[in-house]
Amino acid sequence: MSGATDTSTPAHVEAVLADAASAAPQLAATSPTERSHYLRSVAARIDAEADALIDVAAGETHLEHPRLRTELSRTTNQLRFTAAIVADGAYLNAAIDTGRGPSGAASPDVRRCVVPLGPVLNFAASNFPFAFSVGGGDTASAIGAGCPVVVKAHEGHPRLSARVARIIADELASAGAPRGSLGVIYGRTAARTALLDPRIHAAAFTGSTKAGRALFDLACARPTPIPFYGELGGLNPVFVTAGAIAARGGVIAREYIASVVLGRGQFCTKPGMLFLPRDHGLDGILADAAASIQAGLMLNQSIHAAYVGTLVELSQHRSVRVLATGAPQHADGAVRATLLTTSIDQLEQNIEALSVECFGPSSLIVEYDDWRQLPDIASRLGGTLTATIHAEDDELEAVMPMVGRLQDLAGRVVWNGWPTGVAVTRAMQHGGPYPASTAALHTSVGGAAIQRFVRPVAYQDFPDSALPVALQDDNPLSIPRLVNGVLTTEPIYRN
């Protein structure tokens, strides 16, 4: 690994891209078992250097050591989880039709599986310096799929990015991966150059809607457009019924505040809007819970400035009342929780001004008169990563129409819980309709994340030895395959 951590020179960018292009066919030719081994080796090496890495991260991000230790553990577990997904082989989506049609008529032998896209450009995020950065989920998914990765390091933690990149590159080489399987570049000019380079075949991004949309437009405007998987955030609205308030209103209020301020509100899944029935009686509990949260610094000055600017604009809107204020302009730049409130009528009249994401420890409470008002207003909020309902079991029938509306709005619908925290599981969906993401069919977290970096290819009437290993008769990988409509791991026996 080479190159400065402030801005990469054109020569460095060219070298990284050339190495990635050279590595692409070699990495694509490795077996799932080999790539699984690469990811496990990287996870073990990061765990071994955890203390030093956490110290560097704390110095660059204002995040506390316990939070960073938890995140680093999540990151290495994510690498191992992806390794298991790769080794299992189901992600290859192997399907084989041997030519025995249902009517008995002759048909061609057609076999289909996925292949790696090629070099991937990964834009690291600011708010998760481990889990969504150089060694995060996008890198794990791409390498697991057989794609080299070029990481655009985030300017909020360049020293950490450089150190993690060196660790991963060294460990990949030791494990037998081709040179160029991972490279890192720095600076927006370098990132733009890489995004437009024909050697990059896909890009992944986690960050703001403004920056993500600009990059998405660039990716689509290339002579040969490429997939751009942007995870951009959203309001993550929470809808609470009168029954839930009566049964456990105080608990909901306190848990809501805890979710809003988690990571100082710098989670893309932070609940930015809470809908409560009018006369909910929770103002005091909400204000006290917000006031009890200790002030803290945000990730960097740029995020702090954007947060304060958006918060001031929202709090000074004529239809908004400040319920609890965190006085964001502390002498040392620390921020506390701020709660704003308005009515559903005012929200309907000022939907564009009030339904903006405020990335930080603040949220807008909207009081409604009738649950039946909510489906229409929800549909006007725009795509979001998550949407949440708090309700009681005996309200289920009345609430179900809202569930149908929310599944059109969000990638993940939460029942009687909170959206902050994204479990790394096979069933997780972390995405959603635009502007939550630029690719609502895909997820950036979980077992299906690897599908972003592969594409399907069908092979018709090929000799067995010329087929990809995943499609050969003997099934040497022992992976699950759909053979003539039956899911099996058994070999194919020809007559």
Image (cartoon, rainbow, N blue to C red):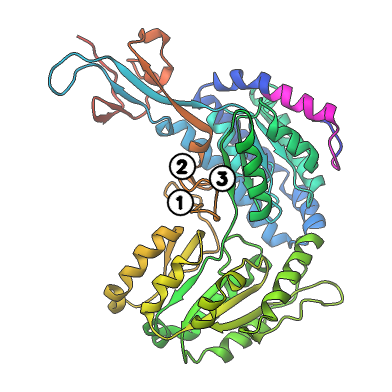
Which residue is tagged 2?
448
What amino acid does circle 2 point to?
A: Ala
Location of residue 165 by image quarter: top right
Q: Nearer the viewer, residue 352 or 413?
A: 352
Q: Is residue 288 above or below residue 8?
A: below
Label 2 environment density (alpha carbons within 10 Å; few <14, some 14–19, many ≥20): many
Q: Position of residue 230 (x, y in %)?
A: 59, 47
Q: What SS does tag 2 mark?
A: helix
Nearest to N terminus: mark 1 or mark 2: 1
Q: Position of residue 87 (x, y in %)?
A: 47, 31
Q: Quadrant of the N terminus?
A: top right
Q: Is residue 289 covered in magenta?
A: no
Alpha-carbon span between mark 2 and mark 3: 13 Å
What amino acid does circle 3 point to?
A: Gln
Nearest to N terminus: mark 1 or mark 3: 3
Which residue is tagged 1?
428
Taking the spot 24% from the left edge, 29% from the top edge, the residue there is 485
Nearest to N terminus: mark 2 or mark 3: 3
